[in-house]
Structure formats: structure tokens, C-alpha cells
Image (spheres, grey):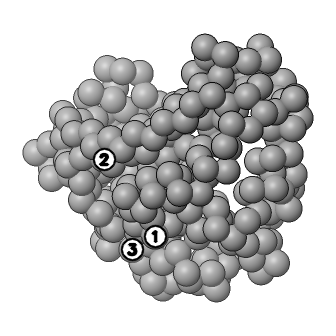
């Protein structure tokens, strides 16, 4: 498979309604899309840079792709799907790409998409996995004023959403949880994302308050660089804790493992990521 053409698109897409959480308020999304071409086939990949997560902007991701990643292809040929995997595995541990993960995501996805079409492989066969059911899909509930929450929840119910994640701020509003359970039903799979809004003390207090609502997991309760606070909360919380912004690189994953944040069986999966077992 020889890469004949590579294109990068910088897209600004308007949102149907503003999307707010603790670290950002957006009325649009700036995305990077890559198209790779070989033998009349196109492979597409997308990255969504977020400065408050990885430090990238859409423009910086565009430039790093244009100057480095796309340039590295240079009409390169891949004799097999195994060569593609090896090429990407070597690249993903490069510090440059670990600090530009959205750009690398777009590039990697485009190359895998093109490869799967070229060799007529499914991604399941490429990664040696087996998935026998439709992929799950969940909805995210942004910070909304009370007068808009009811309509938003009704829309989710009408679309059959039974797995949702609620964005929360510095303070927990019981009405949001009560309203969500009332509209979507008490059997809804409910998670919470604080986007680093809390201190350790606030997190443990808020998590205790949320236990009564059947919350299944709490995502990123403290600032992304507060690894020790994350460990304290994980140790003392009855609700499972999910790291999001705190894991933006292989080094972040290693650090989580070394500090004992992760317990089996999740540690096996994270260990595979941290040591580039792709």
C-alpha cells in the first residue's frame, strides 16, 4: 500500500446548542480531519484538540500534522498491515506525538481506516478482538439552566438513551439528579464528570452525596495534574473513579500504574496501553 495523497482539513462546526462544563463553554467545535489516499481508496481520521486537556489547539494540531506527520509518509509504501501497526507503534511512544495526541489520533485513525479498506480487514481482525454486539453509545448532559434541562432530558429519552454522563460544577445540585432519574428512569446508567472542578475534600463530600442516586462512576474529580489527590479519592470513594484529563500520554498511564491508582481488572488494560502493547 503506497500513500499517494494526504490532505488535512481544519473544520469549525457549529453546535446546535451551547455546551458548557467546568473548564469550557463552547458554541462550536474545532476539529482536524485527515484524508489519506491509495489505489483509489480513502482513509479518514479525526482529532478533536482541546487546549484544556492536552494543550493543543486546532491550529497547532494542523501545523504539526502538516510539517511532521504527513511529511513522514512521503510516498511511503507499506507491504502489509503488520508493517502499518509496527510503524504506528514506534511513532506513538515518540515524545513529540505524546504531546500532540489529537493530531496523532487523526493520523493513526486515517491510516488504519485506509489499511482496513486496502487489505479488506476489519479493525477487529487488526487488533485481534471480538465484539459481537452493537457498540454502546452514551449521552453527555452539559451544565444547563433548569428551564432547559427538562427538554434536553426528554430528547434523550425519546432517543432511547439509557447511559448518560452528567457534567457538574463546583457544587452538586440534587435537582439535576432527581430530574434525570425522573425523566430517564431509575434504571439509567448514570455517571458524573467534574472536569477537575473539586479539591480532594470537596470531591469526597460530593461523591458521598451522590451515592443515593446510584451513580456508577465519577470522572476526573480533581485537576488533571493532581495525581496524589486522585489516588486519595480512589482509595476512599465507594464509587469507582475514572481518570480522563489525567491520562493524555503513555507516561501518564505509567504514572497512574506506579502510584497504584488502578485496580484489577482495569490495571491489565492500562498496562497494555502504558507499555505500548497495541
Q: Evaluate whether residue 135 shows in this view.
A: no
- Secondary structure at badge 2 equals strand
Considering depth in this image, is 202 or 123 the residue closer to the camera? Answer: 123
Residue 26, percent across and down? 24, 54
Q: Horizontally, is 109 left or right of 176 in the view? A: right
Q: Evaluate whether residue 29 shows in this view.
A: yes
Q: Horizontally, is 85 left or right of 240 in the view? A: right
Query: At x 50% / y 66%, what residue is drawn?
Result: 54
Residue that carries the numbered disc 2 in the rendered image? 29
- Secondary structure at badge 3 equals loop
Query: At x 32% / y 73%, what residue is drawn?
Result: 170
Identify the mark nearer the N-term, 1 or 2: 2
Q: Horizontally, is 210 left or right of 260 in the view? A: left
Question: As displayed, is residue 170 above or below residue 182?
Answer: below
Q: Nearer the viewer, mark 3 or mark 2?
A: 2
Residue 91, percent across and down? 75, 56
User: Which of the 4 image quadrants contains residue 151?
Assistant: top left
Q: Residue furthest left?
A: 147
Residue that carries the numbered disc 1 in the rendered image? 55
Q: Is disc 1 surrounded by few (<14), some (14 to 19) or many (20+) residues within 10 Å?
A: some
Disc 3 from disc 1: Cα separation: 18 Å
Residue 205, percent across and down? 46, 77
- Secondary structure at badge 1 equals loop
Q: Nearer the viewer, mark 3 or mark 1?
A: 1
Residue that carries the numbered disc 3 in the rendered image? 197
Q: Are marks 3 and 1 in contact (CB under 8 Å)?
A: no
Query: At x 59% / y 25%, what residue is drawn?
Result: 37
Query: At x 15% / y 53%, what residue is drawn?
Result: 145
Mark number displayed over residue 170: none
Q: Is disc 3 surrounded by few (<14), some (14 to 19) or many (20+) residues within 10 Å?
A: many
Amino acid at each position: 500500500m503506497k500513500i499517494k495523497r494526504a490532505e488535512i482539513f481544519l473544520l469549525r462546526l457549529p453546535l446546535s446548542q451551547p455546551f458548557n462544563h467546568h473548564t469550557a463553554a463552547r458554541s462550536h467545535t474545532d476539529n482536524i480531519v485527515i484524508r489519506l489516499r491509495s489505489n483509489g481508496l480513502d482513509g479518514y481520521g479525526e482529532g478533536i484538540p482541546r487546549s484544556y486537556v492536552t494543550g493543543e489547539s486546532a491550529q497547532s494540531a494542523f501545523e504539526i500534522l502538516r510539517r511532521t506527520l504527513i511529511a513522514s509518509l512521503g510516498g511511503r509504501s507499506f507491504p502489509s498491515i503488520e508493517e502499518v501497526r509496527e510503524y504506528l507503534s514506534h511513532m506513538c511512544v515518540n515524545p513529540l506525538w505524546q504531546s500532540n495526541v489529537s493530531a496523532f489520533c487523526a493520523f493513526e485513525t486515517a491510516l488504519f481506516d485506509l489499511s482496513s479498506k486496502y487489505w479488506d480487514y476489519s479493525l477487529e481482525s487488526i487488533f485481534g478482538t471480538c465484539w459481537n454486539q452493537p457498540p454502546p453509545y452514551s449521552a453527555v448532559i452539559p451544565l444547563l439552566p433548569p428551564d432547559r434541562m427538562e427538554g434536553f432530558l426528554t430528547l434523550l429519552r425519546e432517543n432511547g438513551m439509557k447511559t448518560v454522563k452528567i457534567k457538574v460544577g463546583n457544587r452538586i445540585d440534587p435537582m439535576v439528579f432527581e430530574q434525570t432519574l425522573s425523566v430517564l428512569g431509575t434504571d439509567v446508567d448514570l455517571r458524573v464528570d467534574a472536569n477537575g472542578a473539586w479539591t480532594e475534600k470537596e470531591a469526597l463530600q460530593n461523591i458521598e452525596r451522590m451515592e443515593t442516586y446510584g451513580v456508577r462512576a465519577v470522572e476526573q474529580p480533581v485537576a488533571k495534574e493532581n495525581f496524589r489527590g486522585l489516588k486519595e479519592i480512589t482509595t476512599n470513594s465507594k464509587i469507582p473513579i475514572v481518570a480522563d484529563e489525567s491520562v493524555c500520554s503513555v507516561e501518564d498511564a505509567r504514572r497512574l500504574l506506579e502510584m497504584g491508582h488502578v485496580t484489577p481488572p482495569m490495571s491489565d488494560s492500562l498496562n497494555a496501553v502504558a507499555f505500548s502493547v497495541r
